[in-house]
Amino acid sequence: MSAYANAFGGVFNGLTILVTGHTGFKGAWLSIWLRELGAKVIGYALAPPTTPNHFEIARLADHIKTVHGDILDAEHLKQTIETYQPTVIFHLAAQSNVLHSFRRPVETFTTNVIGTINVLEAVRSTDSVRTVVGITSDKCYANQEWLWGYRENDRLGGHEPYSASKAMAELAIESYRDSFFARDQDDLHGVGIASTRAGNVIGGGDFADFRLVPDCMKALMAGHPIEVRNPHSVRPWQLVLEPLSGYLWLAVKLLQTAPEFAGPWNFGPLEQQGVTAGAIVEKAIECWGAGTWYHPQVEEPQRETALLRLSWDKAANRLGWRPTYTWEEAIAATVGWFKYYQAQHDAAIGHGTSDNIDMYSFCVEQICAYTQRAKALQIAWSVS
């Protein structure tokens, strides 16, 4: 257990936590943080989606229990929950790529909607679970191209499969919460259920295709120019640890007083005005110390929202949560992770041990640095 295990009031120390999708980018980071908070982490997921991937190069299998399973296998999922009896479930397993959703819409809808329902159905028949935090996306909102950020009570929707699937997952969570898990303050056997909608999350260990920052890092490591499809697109960019701190703090509040904190929550970046993709790329090149980028002459038709901003006023006022890093600091932390990874990778290749890479300790260092900054800013979760 790390020196920062008293963050979040020490609530996670000794708890059994199930993380679906722990082999993905965000799921791996969340699992590391929970492990350092003293939790017994059970991961349920398919094999990592990319090579390389955060799960393997952080040697996460050495630190938590991994169950290989498909979120669409309802019986296996239910058996896993019954076997390990988690108190909290963080549901991150999903098809999370917008462009991929155009190529495989059925897979996207099935994984994101039915997979979420399978988790909620399994919880219905399990006595141990007290809290479920379902992670969806800021793209669950109907695209309005507003200058201001979307709020939790704004209309859900989606013109493309990914966004629509996330809106549907939100509706499924709301339906189950109101139909099966609504409870009074005195009902100690109820389940507190919330959904979370985060901005564009960046950080070390993300090797996904068709995502701006991973594309930047892969190009910079290879010494290639960076292709930027939509340099003027505005997104709420934030370091992965920002929303994760929100998910964790929300889970604490749900465990303590579930009815008050059940429902949807946004977790966005410090910069409410949003930042363009072009600015992100320029900053990444600056932090790396070299590189160029270009806008291709021929590109796919515009399929993604051009303007997307997120309001986290609700989290600020009711959770005492706020972001810790600026977007520039988020880029610097991300580039720092990939620089360290490349150094380890090159050293391993030089010694003929290409699989001898372990990023776990470096991830813990970044979590500790982030926690220290949050404590300096007196953010509620870090000083509780």
Image (tube, rainbow, N blue to C red):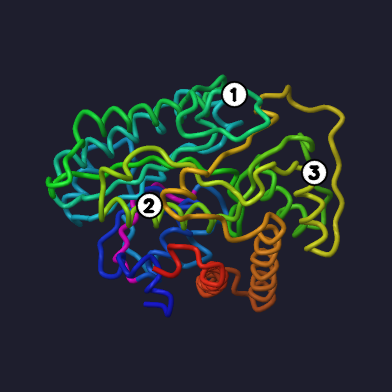
Q: State the CA–CA distance, disc 2 to disc 3.
A: 33 Å
Q: Position of residue 81 (x, y in %)?
A: 21, 49
| Mark toward the viewer: 1 or 3 | 1
If the image is split into quadrants, where does the C terminus sit?
A: bottom left
**Which residue is label 3 attached to?**
278
What residue do we see at 61% from left, 57% from top?
A: 203
Q: Quadrant of residue 289?
A: bottom right
Question: Which of these two is toward me, 79 or 1?
Answer: 1
Q: State the CA–CA distance, disc 2 to disc 1.
A: 26 Å
Q: State the CA–CA distance, disc 1 to disc 3.
A: 22 Å
**Which residue is label 1 attached to?**
143
Classify residue 200 as left or right of residue 288: left
| Mark toward the viewer: 2 or 3 | 2
Amino acid at pointer 1: Asn
Q: Secondary structure at mark 3?
A: helix
**Which residue is label 2 attached to?**
250
Q: Are marks 2 and 3 in contact (CB under 8 Å)?
A: no
